[in-house]
Each structure stands twice: as C-alpha cells, then as structure tokens.
Image: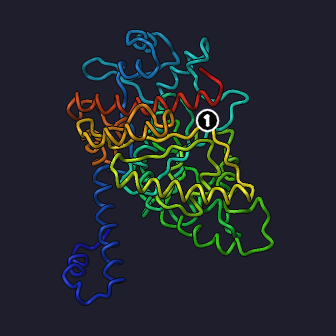
C-alpha cells in the first residue's frame, strides 16, 4: 500500500525530478491509488463476483417461458436456485448452465457449442485507432457467448490490458512476469505451456489469458528471431499465437482476441491465428480516414505474411460501427457511406453510445454484469438491446461457419 505522505512529497517537488523520474513517479502514484480503489470496489478479497439472474432473465437467455424456469427450479433435483426475501428465485450462471444441460438431454439445440467436425472459432477484434470501442466490443462479445452456453476464452493481447482489468485481473498486481500469452509464444528457454497462463474468471464458461506491459517484449524479440537463420517456418512470428491456441482446441468453442491498437508483430500473429475478424470503426470522418490507413497497411503486411506461408483463410470479416449516436446526422451519413461501400460486411446492428455502458464501466462492469435495478431502466434496456443485436449477429456468423442455420 503506498505511503500517502511519500506520495504527497513527490507531488510537491516536481521541479527537482527529471522527466523520466516524474513520469515514473506519476505511474507509481496512480498505480497505488488504483489498487486502493480496486480493493474498495471489490472488498474484501479484491475479486469480482457475477451477480445472480432473475427467472425472467434466465427465460430470455434460454428461450423458454418464465413459468417453465420456475417450474424446473421447483421440481428438478439437478436444478438449484436461491429465493430472495420477497420469494423470487434467482440463479447463478452455473445454475443457468445446469438448466441448459438438463434441457439439452432431450433437445441438443439448447447446447450451442461445438460438435464433431466444428472447428475452433477465433475472433480477432482489431483497429489501431484508440477510442474505437475495440476492447468494449471484445469483452461484450465474450460475455454474451458465455451467457448463452459457449465455452469461451478471452485473450488480452493489448499491453494496456483493459480487458484483463474488466475481467477482474489488475495487470500491475495480479499478472506477474511470464503470465501473459507472451510466456507461451516467446522465443527463448523460458517459454511455458499455454495452459499455464489461462485463468478462470468469475464469469462461468469464460476463461482469460491476461495481458500486461510485458506483451511489448514480443515486438522487441521478433526482429532478433527473424535474423536467426536456424529458425524453422513453424517458428515464424506469425505462427506463434495460432500454434499456442491450437493446444487449447479441445477446451473451447470460441476464442475472442482483443488485439493491440498497433499494427505490429503481435497483431499480425493474431490475425494469422484468427478464423474471423471484427474491425471496429467510430463513424467520424477522421476515424474512417484512420481506418483506411489501417486497412492499407494491413493488406500490405498480410500479403508479405501470406507469401511466407501464413494462413489467411477467414470464415468472415465484418465492420462494426461503434459509439453510434442515432441523432447525429453526420454519423448517419458516414454509416450510409460505409454500407454503400462494403454492403453486408458492415454489421446491421451498431454499438450505440450509451450512458448505461459508461455507468457500468465506472465500477468495472459490463452492461451484462450490471443489474437493471442499478440504473434508469429504459436506458439500460436500450443498451442491452443494442449490445444483444451486435452480438447476436456475431453468434449467427459463428453458427453459419459451423454449417448451422
């Protein structure tokens, strides 16, 4: 825990410090205060828990009636729940999945995961423009799929590690050296099995490979590895993320990768590991122009990777409009412009800019974690409806890749 007097002393004497010392001290001060805030939010053990769900929410997730959910909870021994003081039943996500397994005994469609012959779906969520909603998209896609019974692995490849923090792991305190994906894809003798860097989260059905600043090391190590003439094709940088994830193939239905906001070796390796790509774009002209540069650079670099043997066969690629404001005329024009260019490659649903998502984020929650009672209900409902629309389209694309209607 930081010493407040020491912190105050550092803040009083910035003129005595060089710029590197000032930045380093600012980082230490902020890091310490964030840890204090984190412990206050998630006391006593600084770990997140997922809320319980009402029978109405469970019915919507499973596609059955509210009364049927309550009937199963009352009659089936394999289905458990808790009753509130008012007599209403609530369910944990583990209990929802137990109902899903019970229903799946007679109707397999209640179990949406992979079947024999279905390949692992690896979704790379990417853009190198900050503020495009990339991490928000990746987290909500992963949680949406877990809520619907898929086995999901979230991979945080962004050194800023916002996805990790949202899923309950502070990168400065909970993720040590060699505990990110870098540990499984590094080039030296310290490489470790990928299963050792996978963490279980509080969100049933959703595991995480966390991130932190050590992911930058891959960008520094790769040029040296490329200069090593003894390295084989299977050791090439663009194969390393895919090779690591292939060792987890039997454990998951879907992998969601939050790519770095740069077009470096790590992003290229993630794109080569992916079976599908979701590119976020904020509908402002500067952001669209930036995306144009991103697409041009990505095309050139992937062409080089393809010539070197990289796999670029995707099931689908889509653009997702994020932070959309329905009453903003210029944004509507840009969306229409994008649709005229890319047609069905622009998702029909859009991630709307919502105070509900922002309010939930203040306590490091997603809209799926926050309860309806915690904010204005109409605002909450609109946010959930928009988020479900986006993620429902992604789920349809996954199912189509598996040959299902």
Q: Could you say which is closer to the camera, residue 275 or residue 251?
A: 275
Q: Quadrant of the C terminus?
A: top right
For residue 199, above or below residue 170: above
Left or right placement of residue 395 versus residue 44 in this view: right
- In terms of image quadrants, where is residue 4? bottom left
At x 42%, y 50%, the residue is: 168
**Position of residue 294 in the picture relative to residue 254 (left or right):** left
Q: Check the picture and name the quadrant holding the N terminus.
A: bottom left
In the image, residue 57 sits, relative to residue 182, either above or below, namely above
Examine the image and state in which quarter residue 356 appears.
Answer: top left
Foreground residue, 39 or 403? 403
Tell me which residue sits at (28%, 17%) in the image.
87
Q: Position of residue 9 (x, y in %)?
A: 21, 81
Can residue 112 be seen in the rendering of this structure?
yes
**What residue appears at the point 21 percent right and 85 percent down from the top-left corner?**
13
Q: Residues within 10 Å of mark 1 (few under 14, many from 20)?
A: many
Give whichever of 7, 181 is nearer the camera: 181
Residue 174 in the image, given as x and y percentages of width and height: 46, 59
Q: Residue furthest bottom?
A: 16
**Foreground residue among 306 and 255:** 306
Q: Taking 304 as reference, is 200 above or below it? A: above
> x, y percentage for residue 156?
51, 53
Left or right of 85 on screen, residue 54: right
Q: Who's the residue at 34% across and 72% down the image?
A: 27
Residue topped by disc 1 = 253
What secondary structure is marked by label 1?
A: loop
Total numbered labels: 1
**How was the colour assigned to the protein in this rendering?**
rainbow
- Residue 191 pos. (x, y %): 67, 64
Taking the image as drawn, is residue 47 in sight? no
């Amino acid at each position: 825990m930081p010493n407040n007097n020491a912190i105050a002393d550092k803040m009083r004497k910035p003129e005595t410090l060089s710029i590197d010392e000032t930045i380093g001290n600012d980082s230490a001060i902020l890091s310490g205060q964030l840890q204090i805030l984190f412990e206050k939010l998630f006391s006593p053990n600084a770990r997140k828990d997922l809320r319980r769900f009402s029978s109405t929410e469970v019915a919507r997730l499973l596609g059955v009636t509210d009364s049927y959910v309550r009937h199963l909870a009352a009659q089936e021994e394999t289905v458990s729940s808790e009753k509130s003081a008012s007599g209403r039943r609530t369910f944990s996500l583990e209990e929802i999945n137990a109902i899903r397994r019970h229903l799946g005994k007679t109707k397999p469609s209640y179990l949406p995961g992979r079947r024999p012959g279905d390949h692992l779906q690896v979704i790379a969520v990417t853009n190198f423009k900050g503020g495009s909603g990339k991490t928000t998209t990746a987290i909500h896609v992963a949680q949406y799929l877990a809520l619907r019974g898929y086995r999901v692995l979230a991979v945080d490849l962004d050194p800023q590690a916002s996805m990790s923090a949202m899923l309950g792991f502070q990168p400065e305190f909970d993720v040590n050296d060699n505990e990110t994906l870098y540990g499984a894809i590094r080039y030296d003798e310290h490489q470790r099995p990928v299963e050792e860097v996978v963490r279980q989260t509080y969100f049933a059905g959703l595991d995480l490979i966390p991130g932190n600043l050590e992911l930058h090391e891959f960008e520094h190590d790769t040029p040296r590895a490329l200069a090593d003439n003894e390295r084989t094709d299977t050791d090439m940088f663009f194969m390393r993320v895919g090779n690591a994830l292939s060792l987890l193939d039997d454990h998951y239905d879907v992998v969601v990768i939050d790519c770095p906001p740069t077009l470096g070796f790590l992003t290229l390796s993630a794109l080569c590991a992916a079976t599908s790509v979701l590119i976020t774009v904020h509908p402002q002209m500067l952001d669209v122009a930036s995306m144009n540069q991103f697409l041009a650079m990505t095309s050139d670099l992937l062409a080089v990777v393809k010539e070197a043997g990289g796999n670029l066969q995707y099931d689908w690629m889509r653009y997702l409009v994020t932070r959309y404001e329905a009453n903003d005329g210029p944004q509507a024009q840009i969306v229409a412009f994008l649709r005229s260019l890319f047609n069905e490659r622009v998702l029909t649903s859009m991630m709307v800019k919502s105070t509900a998502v922002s309010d939930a984020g203040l306590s490091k929650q997603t809209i799926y974690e926050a309860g309806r009672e915690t904010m204005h209900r109409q605002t909450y409902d609109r946010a959930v409806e928009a988020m479900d629309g986006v993620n429902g389209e992604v789920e349809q694309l996954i199912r189509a890749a598996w040959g299902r209607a």
